Image (tube, rainbow, N blue to C red):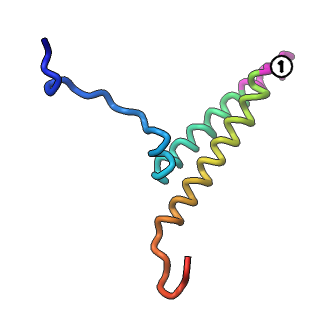
Amino acid sequence: MTDEGDSATPARSPGRGELLRSSAKASQSGSELLFAGLSVGAIGLAGAALGAVCPLCVVATPALLSAGAVQKLRAKWLERKAEPAPAGEPR
């Protein structure tokens, strides 16, 4: 029998709720998605240069790039929302 209090708890990955509330997490996620989209696009471009077109690359590249762009925009929106409004200006 093991004692649950002594064992180390595994690190949790950020949940969807965390991404929707934290601008830093949304920005990081957006950067990762953009990097993945650019990587898949580069692989697809290299394959096309060699004469083979990868259907997965054709679909995944714009999907990853657009998801990354949306996450980056969400991060900027969350940053603006978190800033205090200047005095006398409604938000």
Residue 50: percent from left, percent from top: 83, 17
Residue 21: percent from left, percent from top: 47, 52
**Rendered residue at 17%/23% (across/down):** 4
Q: Residue furthest right?
A: 51
Give the residue number, with chain letter if any, for mark 1. Answer: 53
The picture quadrant where one finds residue 68 is top right
- Tell me the chief SS of the magenta region: helix
Hey, what amino acid is under mark 1?
A: Val
**Rendered residue at 53%/41% (across/down):** 29
Magenta segment: does it hold 50?
A: yes
Q: Secondary structure at mark 1?
A: loop
Magenta segment: does it hold 9?
A: no
Residue 89: percent from left, percent from top: 54, 84
Q: Residue furthest top?
A: 1
**Rendered residue at 47%/69% (across/down):** 83
Residue 16: percent from left, percent from top: 49, 40
Compared to 12, does 73 lie above or below? below
**Rendered residue at 83%/19% (across/down):** 53
In the picture, measured across the screen, residue 84 lies left or right of residue 89, that is left
How many residues crowd around disc 1 within 10 Å: few (fewer than 14), some, or many (20 or more)? some
For the C terminus, the image quarter is bottom right
Q: Which residues are magenta?
A: 43-55
In the picture, measured across the screen, residue 89 lies left or right of residue 18, that is right
For the N terminus, the image quarter is top left
